[in-house]
Image: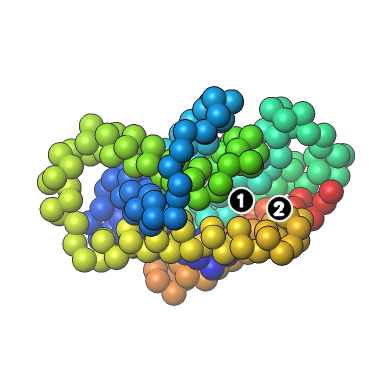
Amino acid sequence: MFFLGSAYPLGKFGLNASVNPILFGALRMGIAFLCLMPFCKIKVPSRKYFLPLIGFSVSMGVAVNFFLYVSIDVSNILAPITIGAQLSIPFAIILSSFFLKESISFKKWLLIIASFLGIVLIAFDPKVLDEILGFLLICGMAFFYGLSQVFSRYLKELDVKFTNAIMSFIGFVVLFSLSNIFEGNIITQLNNIDLNGWLAVLYAGAIISILGHLMMFYLYKFYPVGKVLPFYALFPVFGLILTFFMFGEIPTLIMITGGIIVITSVFLLNKTS
């Protein structure tokens, strides 16, 4: 959770240094692909996996990175978007109900509503109102992250290294193309990236995308999902602590109150059967 929470302040560090947001996401996916390739057996999966694999790759590899880094880029404060990313869990549960016909208990609905109310409370903070675009973009990221979890349920019989390698490759190709269209010539952009920018990109691709997620998958081998997933609520805590030490950012009372509501709701949501 420390590694996952560090994505926000380290992403801001890289974008402030010299990297454009869409290119940052593309390079992150490219590095993740290169790290995964030596451990993958390349084979064409059954046709029934084609659409879910494309859906997973587009939602996780393209949309999540696009919305995440554009949100970080347009935001001057990171606390609201770090907390707002927690909406991915409620979104995943709602979308699972819609696509996978999974039932949602009354208690879960109450916790989902509570998490959204916490986000609404944060949105009324005067500092957040001045940066509502970044806040809305991170909500879009949370939606696509939740959607990617639904697609991943259709791919559970495939090797996780293979699915993530395909996702990373598609994410790299699409985001690389979008960056060339909207952010300027790729060669010029790459030449302008300084050492701090490259270090931030390498950290995002190798540490956050690979090591952070692999540690989660490792725990799933020994513990049930219900025991591991509640710890997901910790990543914004680490993100906020790192943001304070790196940028001196102190959340307002409204952000803290809304954050407690959101994080507590998501924690209980993950523990509720």
Q: Mark 2 points at which residue?
A: 266
Q: Residue furthest right?
A: 106
x 17%, y 47%: residue: 189
141, above or below 244, in the image: above
SS for tag 1? helix
Residue 138 pos. (x, y %): 50, 44
Amino acid tagged 1: Gln
Q: Residue 77 at what x, y percent from top left?
A: 44, 57
Tell me where residue 248 sits by quadrant. Answer: bottom left
| Residue 152, image x, y percentages | 60, 40
Q: Earlier in the sequence, mark 2 or mark 1?
A: 1
Q: Which residue in the protein does label 1 denote?
A: 86
Q: What residue type is labelled 2?
A: Val
**Residue located 32% across and 37% down the image:** 173
Q: Which mark is residue 115?
A: none
Secondary structure of the residue carrying tag 2 is helix
Q: In this view, does 252 lie to the left or right of 220?
A: left
- Tell me the quarter of the picture where residue 109 sits: top right
Residue located 56% across and 39% down the image = 148
Confirm whether residue 272 shows in the render.
yes
| Circle 2 residues within 10 Å: few <14, some 14–19, many ≥20 | many
